[in-house]
Amino acid sequence: MVNYFVQFITVLLIYLIGNGLVRWLDLPVPGSIVGMALLFLGLTLKVCKLKWVEGIAQLHIKHITLLFIPFAVGVWHYTGIFWIEGFKLTAILAASSIAVLLVTAGMAEFFEIKTKRGRQNGKND
């Protein structure tokens, strides 16, 4: 439990740094996106070790569907938009979902191959 708390604080600090950078540099991007980019860079450059955030990340992924409940409930308030712009919205949602699926699958496969290659070469990160 303490491990999750420390990992949560680590991710929270990276998120807050991202928000601070967005405010300081007046960037037109959400702070959470900048924070994720910083975490990605930190993990890629080995500044941040995977074990520092892996447990809490797995916990978040395990319960990510809970984050979509407010969105799904909110959509029901705007069903009229779907009747007016339904085809456009369906096409956009389908295209963006397929794009996310393909990019996620590609990245997962890339990192799986990279991990296997690292294990074959005797590297354990």
Image (cartoon, grey):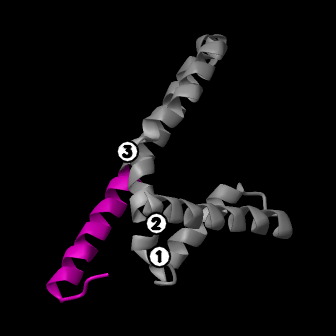
Q: Quadrant of the C terminus?
A: bottom left
Quarter of the figure with the N terminus? bottom left
Residue 109 sits in quarter: bottom left
Q: Earlier in the sequence, mark 2 or mark 1?
A: 1
The residue depicted at 44 percent of the width and 35 percent of the height is 65
Q: Amino acid at mark 2?
A: Val
Q: Please tell me whether mark 2 or mark 1 is closer to you in this view.
A: 2
In magenta stretch: residue 4: no
Mark sitting on residue 43: 1
Q: Residue type at mark 3?
A: Lys
Question: SS class of the residue under badge 3?
Answer: helix
The x and y percentages for residue 112 are 25, 67
Cα separation between marks 2 and 1: 10 Å
Instruction: Please tell me whether mark 1 sits on a helix, a strand or a loop.
Output: helix
Is 65 positioned to the left or the right of 34 in the image?
A: left
Q: Quadrant of residue 34?
A: bottom right
Which of the two discs, 3 and 2, labels the residue nearer the N terminus?
2
Q: Is residue 36 visible?
A: no
Please name the residue that numbered disc 2 is placed on: 53
Cα–Cα gap, marks 1 and 3: 21 Å
Q: Position of residue 84 (x, y in %)?
A: 64, 13
Q: Quick check: marks 2 and 1 in contact, CB under 8 Å? A: yes
**Magenta region:** 102-125
- What residue lies at 49% left-to-right and 84% top-to-bottom? 45
Q: Which mark is residue 62?
A: 3
Was residue 110 drawn as part of the magenta stretch in this picture? yes
Q: Residue furthest bottom?
A: 122
> Residue 10's spot in the image, x, y percent?
57, 67
